[in-house]
């Protein structure tokens, strides 16, 4: 099933084939071979781009020009005979219908994106005010109370975002393993990472099932408009990573990035907290997997630094490690496509793992054996995750 929304109905491959058959019997006098070539051209340049969410203005303009040229018996490599007037009118009507679908979906995308923006601005103001008060008031009890209020505001922010996604009717998630989660527990969440939508999915799925979810963010993203300040106000741990070349020029900075992250995690000791770490460090792509020669089919090699820092900072507080696997059977989703109403199916599998006590007091920077052990432990989990993803994809028919 291709999920092209038209008047809240899905257009299937069978319906597309039926439409092509109707065009065939519309009176166009063409040789069979020429007809096959033209129908193939129509499917590739008209139907498939819409089905595959690739409806750009330039492509549509090119398609219109090409079909008109074909219908006029122009100088095409197909060298087909002239279509009759009825067939040309059907092609033009079809293109107008496709253009209208694209316009409606883009308008829907603008409205949904505006709703997300307004929701963010609405919650941003009280969150920022309370964060500034928390920064200025030195009393620990007051700070803890403000932290709880901030977490409640953050949960409401996420709830409204999730409601908007459901209102759009564009996301269908299947949950596995979330029944035993608790809100009064500390969790370290590790997950694979395919798209920016992962954050929305994890927040929506885990919101109010576990404590407010905080995730490691690159230091540069603090300058992201509005959201960067909101993340700072919500005590998200920012990570500043230095390249090997930079450390070679500035050896005194070695370990500073881990110290910064460790200090950020220390503030979570007083209130139940969930910290998520995308172990791969970046979003998965086939190009990245091939470039780094990673030994997995659906994952990049895990990076253990952020995990080790979280464990050394507050490992004794974690009641469990939540191993989350995200799978998009139809391919990774894009936020804009979801706003436009593209149907997104996502499977979220959650496995609770015991916290390895040997990880808690290790020195990832200076202890080579500890570093190898952590990398090996995560490597085994990643191998299981890779096999699990393949099983999910193989059995995707059972989720439809």
Image (cartoon, rainbow, N blue to C red):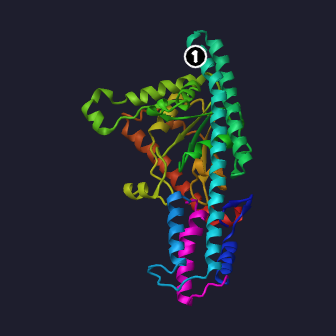
Q: Position of residue 222 (x, y in %)?
A: 48, 30
* Label tally: 1
Residue 318 percent across, percent down from the top left: 60, 33
* Most common SS among magenta residues: helix
Q: Quadrant of the C terminus?
A: bottom right
Q: Is residue 293 visible?
A: yes
Which residue sits at x=31%, y=39%? 244
The single residue placed furthest to the left in the displayed view is 249
Q: Residues within 10 Å of mark 1 (few under 14, many from 20)?
A: few
Name the residue at the bottom extreme: 31
Compared with residue 262, is residue 2 higher up or lower down, i.e. above or below? below
Q: Answer yes or no: is residue 360 visible.
A: no
Q: Nearer the viewer, residue 187 or 83?
A: 83
Provide the residue span drawn in magenta. Answer: 26-54
Q: Which quadrant of the figure contains the N terminus?
A: bottom right
**Element on which disc 1 rests:** helix
- Residue 252, horizontal then vertical, whole percent: 29, 26
**Is residue 286 highlighted in magenta?**
no
Corner quadrant of residue 387:
bottom right
Pick whichever, 240 or 310, lies toward us. Answer: 240
Residue, disc 1: 132
- At 53% across and 48% down in the image, what residue appears? 193
Q: Residue at x 42, y 39 (%)?
A: 370
Say which of 224 and 148 sits in front: 224
Percent x, y of residue 104: 66, 53
Against 51, residue 83 (above or below) is below
With respect to residue 7, does 183 lie above or below?
A: above
């Amino acid at each position: 099933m291709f999920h092209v929304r038209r008047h809240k109905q899905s257009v299937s491959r069978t319906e597309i084939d039926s439409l092509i058959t109707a065009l065939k019997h519309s009176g166009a006098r063409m040789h069979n071979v020429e007809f096959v070539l033209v129908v193939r051209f129509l499917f590739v340049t008209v139907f498939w781009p819409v089905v595959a969410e690739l409806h750009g203005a330039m492509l549509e303009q090119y398609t219109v020009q090409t079909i008109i040229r074909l219908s006029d018996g122009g100088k095409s490599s197909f060298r087909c005979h002239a279509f009759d007037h009825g067939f040309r009118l059907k092609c033009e009507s079809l293109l107008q219908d496709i253009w209208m679908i694209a316009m409606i979906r883009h308008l829907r995308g603008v409205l949904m994106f505006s709703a997300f923006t307004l929701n963010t601005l609405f919650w941003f103001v009280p969150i920022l005010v309370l964060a500034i008060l928390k920064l200025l008031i030195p009393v620990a009890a007051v700070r803890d109370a403000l932290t709880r209020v901030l977490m409640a505001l953050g949960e409401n922010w996420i709830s409204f975002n999730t409601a908007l996604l459901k209102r759009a009717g564009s996301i269908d998630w299947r949950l596995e393993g979330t029944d035993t989660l608790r809100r009064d527990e500390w969790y370290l969440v590790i997950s694979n990472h395919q798209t920016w939508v992962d954050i929305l999915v994890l927040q929506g799925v885990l919101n109010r099932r576990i404590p407010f979810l905080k995730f490691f963010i690159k230091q540069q993203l603090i300058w992201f408009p509005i959201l960067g300040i909101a993340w700072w106000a919500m005590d998200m741990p920012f990570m500043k990573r230095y390249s090997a070349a930079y450390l070679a020029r500035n050896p005194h900075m070695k370990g500073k990035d881990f110290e910064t992250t460790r200090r950020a995690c220390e503030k979570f000791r007083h209130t139940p907290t969930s910290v998520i770490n995308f172990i791969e460090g970046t979003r998965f792509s086939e190009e990245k997997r091939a470039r780094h020669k990673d030994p997995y089919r659906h994952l990049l090699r895990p990076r253990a630094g952020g995990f080790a820092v979280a464990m050394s900072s507050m490992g004794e507080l974690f009641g469990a490690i939540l191993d989350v696997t995200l799978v998009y059977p139809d391919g990774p989703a894009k936020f804009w496509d979801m706003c436009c109403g593209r149907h997104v199916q996502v499977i979220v599998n959650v496995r609770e793992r015991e916290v390895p006590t040997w990880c808690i007091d290790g020195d990832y920077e200076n202890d080579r054996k500890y570093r190898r052990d952590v990398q090996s432990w995560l490597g085994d989990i990643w191998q299981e995750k890779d096999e699990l993803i393949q099983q999910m994809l193989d059995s995707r028919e059972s989720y439809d």
